[in-house]
Image (tube, helix red, strand yellow):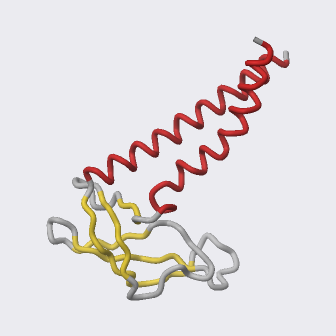
Amino acid sequence: MTFYLYLTFFLIGSILAYYSYFFYSKTSNLLENGIKTTAIVTELYPDPDVESNYGVAKPYFNFVDRFQEKQKITNGITSSPPRYKTGDKVEIVYHIDDPKQIKLVSFWGLYRWSIILLMIAAPFLVIGGSYLLYSW
């Protein structure tokens, strides 16, 4: 019975590690094939999903894509205090065919999901894998 529990731990960790690698590969591909440009923070909106909006803001960015069309995007991350001010310039990378698929060129902007999933996967892999190795 405990063997199956630890096998389940190991499988959960493996699946999470796979998705971590998947997001890492997707980001690496975007960096290699995407278009880098500079976006300007135009507005800071209070996040409607946060009950107490005390200082919590979601930045909106404007940039001109390769078709010379003005794009307005947000990265979906709110912070308190706001990380950006109106008028700040940030480097972004966007998909060559879809300017709505963007990532901020920063550590957390690029690798956020890879790191989070790997942090969750690591204990599952260590606990499940060590038990399986010990029992083998």
Instruction: Give above or below for 98 relative to 41.
Output: above
**Quadrant where the N terminus is found in the figure:** top right
**In x, y percent, where is residue 22?**
46, 39
Q: Residue at x 61, y 80 (%)?
A: 56
Q: For this rendering, which residue is in front, 38 or 74? A: 38
> Image check: 108 left or right of 53?
left
Which quadrant is the C terminus positioned in? top right
Q: Residue at x 45, y 57 (%)?
A: 110
Identified at 73% across, 18% down, the residue is: 133
Left or right placement of residue 18 versus residue 74 in this view: right
Query: How many numbered marks are there?
Result: 0
In x, y percent, where is residue 40?
A: 34, 80
Left or right: 68, with 130 as reference point: left
- Is residue 132 or residue 57 the one in the foreground? 132
When the figure is inspected, residue 69 is found, relative to residue 85, above or below; the finding is: above
Residue 129 position (above or below residue 36)? above
Residue 66: x and y in percent read 17, 65
Residue drawn at x 41%, y 65% as measured from the top left: 104
Residue at the outermost left position: 67
100 up-or-down from 79: above or below:
above
Measured from the top left, where is residue 61 in percent x and y?
37, 76
Answer with left or right where residue 68 lies relative to residue 24: left
User: Which residue, as the protein is rendered here, is positioned at the far front?
Assistant: 134
The extreme right residue here reads: 1
Out of 69 and 121, give the one closest to the viewer: 121
Q: Nearer the viewer, residue 116 or 129?
A: 129
